[in-house]
Amino acid sequence: TGTTRPLRILQHVQRSAKQGDALSVITAIDSYCSKVEWAMNVGDKKGEILDTVVLETRPRYVLELGTYCGYSTLRIARLLPPGARLITIEMNPHYAQVAKEIFQYAGLDAQVELLVGSSTVLIPQLKKKLDIEKFDLVFIDHWKVSYLPDTKLLEECGLLKAGSVLLADNVICPGAPDYLKYIRNCPRYRSQYFPAQLEYLQVEDGVEKSVFLG
Ligand code: SAM
Ligand code: MG
């Protein structure tokens, strides 16, 4: 048919959301994905937990692993104080192209730095490439097997500081058991689980908030 789910989400946004209004774009995506086609956005319920963490952390530097169509990126971007930087990493070029168009439609493209490539390759380049020192907040939401190795990579690359917050989505469904075991037992983190439901479904899932203690 030549169409893809991300393109159908984009089309729905263009038809039903107000240009330049990020909240109406977020609402349009939630409406489409709860009524027409499920998609792997963090969704409205866990999205509220994400919003709360962004607001209480007041981050200046934010990293997101896994952009997909840019739904969670928009949720974060709209809450950032002026001058904050939000870097989001997506390895699928088609998803990244759709996300870019969604950021433009929402009027938030100037607030977002979208990097196309694998997190494993890009994380070690961030300091030099983007002139970033440390991240205040990292939203981890790419493939679940990569949560743990990429967290260790962030540590090794010196991208975390005392007080940095990691927020990991889908720790129950699909689940990231090795990540949870590490982050809950490592004395360098203080970790807390927030129960919720998988996006757009009545299935148990939740997010794990972990503060790096240095
Ligand atoms: N955070 C998005 C949201 O809530 O709207 C959803 C992200 S989706 C669950 C996961 C995305 O991570 C997919 O688009 C996938 O292509 C991307 N991805 C998976 N592994 C990756 C990696 N190692 N590096 C970069 N992107 C990756
Ligand atoms: Mg997710």
Image: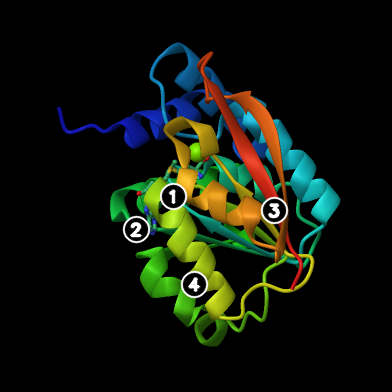
Q: Position of residue 75 (x, y in %)?
A: 65, 42
Q: Residue at x 61, y 55 (%)?
A: 183
Toward the viewer: 207 or 91? 207
Q: Is residue 135 above or below residue 76?
A: below
Checking the image for residue 142, the label placed there is 1
Q: Which residue is mark 2?
A: 91
Queried on whether the Cβ of the residue with tag 2 lies below 8 angstroms from ligand 1, the answer reads yes
For badge 1, the amino acid type reads: His
Checking the image for residue 65, the label placed there is none
For badge 3, the amino acid type reads: Ser
Toward the viewer: 31 or 195? 195
Q: Which residue is mark 3?
A: 210
Query: Real-space Cα distance between discs 2 and 4?
Result: 17 Å
Q: Are marks 4 and 1 in contact (CB under 8 Å)?
A: no
Q: Residue at x 46, y 79 (%)?
A: 124
Query: Real-space Cα distance between discs 3 and 1?
Result: 17 Å
Q: Earlier in the sequence, mark 4 or mark 1?
A: 1
- The C terminus sits in image quarter: bottom right
Query: Real-space Cα distance between discs 2 and 1?
Result: 9 Å
